[in-house]
Image (cartoon, rainbow, N blue to C red):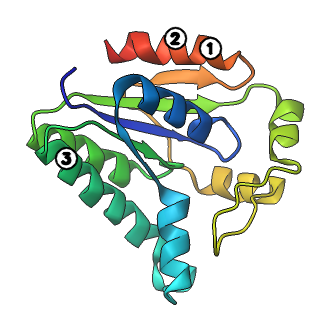
């Protein structure tokens, strides 16, 4: 398979990380998670007030570029709420002549979405567990997604979403 850059975006609790791990196993790609990168920045004293979100998204771009430079695929697991970040990732793929696949994860069932967050423990050192209030805050700051993309619904079985992602990758 040609080295590909895949961005899995969407609100917290919509299945991005689960899908990223399953897809990575399928295509042999590295997964880079924005929250893990930002937590690392926090542990080093770079706070949200100092631009940790932006720095983490820039790190995603750098890591993706390094993977593609080596001829290896990368999956970015992030909310991808900003259009300029998505454009930077697309430009990185273009720089290395790699296909770019944008996948937006959603959850059409609000009760299910809340349940997915309740009691979830990701165990990221130095990071907090995301609440429904965080989802609403991120939703209020998210920019529209006019780009071509695949939209996957966490209300559907993971196997179906993985199959749709595989088809989209082909």
Q: Is residue 94 left or right of residue 114?
A: left
- Considering only vertical position in the picture, is 167 above or below 10? above
| Quadrant, the N terminus | top left
Name which quarter of the figure residue 58 lies in.
bottom left
Q: Does residue 137 sit above or below 18 in this rendering? A: below
Measured in 3D between alpha carbons, the distance from the residue under mark 2 to the one under mark 3, in whole angstroms, is 26 Å
Mark-to-mark CA distance, 3 and 1: 29 Å
Relative to 143, is 34 above or below?
below
- Image quarter in which the C terminus is found: top left
Residue 163's tag is 2
Q: Of helix, strand and loop, which one carries label 3?
A: helix
Disc 1 to disc 2, C-alpha distance = 6 Å
Q: Position of residue 48 (x, y in %)?
A: 55, 79
Residue shown at 35% from the left, 46% from the top: 86
The residue indicated by pointer 1 is: 159
Q: Are dots 1 and 2 in contact, CB under 8 Å?
A: yes
Mark 3 highlights which residue? 92
Compared across the picture, whether 70 is left or right of 105 comes to left
Q: Earlier in the sequence, mark 2 or mark 3?
A: 3
Nearest the viewer among 91 and 17 is 17
Location of residue 77 in the rendering, given as x and y in whole percent from the top left corner: 48, 46
**Closer to the eye: label 3 or 1:** 1
Report the side of 79 relative to 5 (left or right): right
């Amino acid at each position: 398979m040609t080295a590909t850059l895949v961005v899995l975006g969407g609100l917290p609790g919509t299945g991005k990380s689960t899908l990223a791990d399953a897809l990575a196993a399928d295509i042999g790609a590295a997964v880079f998670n924005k929250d893990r990168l930002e937590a690392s920045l926090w542990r080093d004293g770079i706070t949200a007030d100092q631009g940790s979100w932006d720095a983490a998204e820039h790190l995603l771009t750098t890591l993706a570029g390094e993977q593609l430079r080596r001829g290896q695929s990368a999956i970015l697991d992030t909310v991808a709420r900003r259009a300029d970040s998505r454009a930077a990732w697309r430009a990185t793929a273009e720089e290395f002549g790699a296909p770019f696949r944008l996948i937006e994860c959603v959850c059409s069932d609000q009760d299910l979405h809340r349940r997915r967050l309740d009691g979830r423990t990701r165990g990221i050192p130095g990071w907090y567990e995301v609440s429904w209030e965080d989802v609403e805050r991120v939703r209020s700051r998210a920019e529209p997604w006019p780009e071509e993309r695949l939209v996957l619904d966490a209300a559907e079985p993971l196997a179906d979403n993985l199959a749709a992602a595989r088809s989209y990758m082909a």
